[in-house]
Image (cartoon, rainbow, N blue to C red):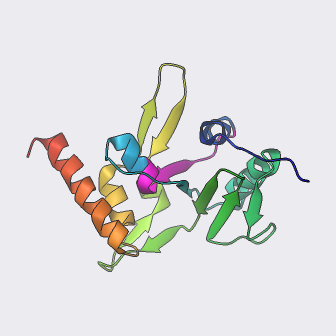
Amino acid sequence: MQAENFVDPIDFIIRLNQGGVKYLLIGRQALVIYGAPLQSFDYDFYIDPSRETLKKIWKIAKDLRMAIEPPPPKASRKLSLYADNLKVDIFRAKKYPIRSGDFLFFNEMFKNKKIVRDKDKFFVCLSSLEDLKKTKQTRLTAKDREDIKYIELLLNTRTGS
């Protein structure tokens, strides 16, 4: 019988930070941090698309005994990491098309990031709300449309509209 492998999402993020990985938390977990009343059971990260960054992700996954799909050395635009209690999706393209005909570029989004810190020196890099809205326009599923409504509400609350 194989031992269970539980990975704390906070530990995963700490390892990203310690490893110097350029990343953005995107998806519903980012919305939860911004204050949206949603839940999600996976974590989505958009990372610097360099091969060096990908190798850092592979090392973190290996150290945490997480399964990697597709397995290394394949350098896919999207990979998923699995522990018994955690799924992490990693997106790593230089750009992603959105339905408006525009593109999301990692470097531009990273410049717009919001860093959220707690009192214990923990921090996480979030996509800005404006960029997060654009990420939801890549597929525009029913869930994405619901998320866009929350993003617009958060943006309006922030601007006082």
Q: Residue furthest front?
A: 1
Residue visible at 91% across and 53% down?
1
Region in magenta: 19-29
Q: Is residue 42 left or right of residue 39?
A: right
Q: Is residue 125 visible?
A: yes
Residue 36, horizontal then vertical, whole percent: 31, 47
Residue 122: where, in percent of width, then height?
55, 28
Residue 17 placement, left or right of 71: left
Observer able to see residue 112:
no
Question: What residue is drawn where x is 79% and y is 68%?
Answer: 71
Residue 97 percent coordinates (x, y): 42, 76
Q: Looking at the image, which residue is at 33% across and 80% down?
A: 101
- Give the residue at the far left of this rendering: 161
Q: Position of residue 115 (x, y in %)?
A: 44, 37
**Height in image: 71 above or below 160?**
below
Q: Residue at x 75, y 62 (%)?
A: 68
Residue 45 belongs to the span the image colors magenta: no
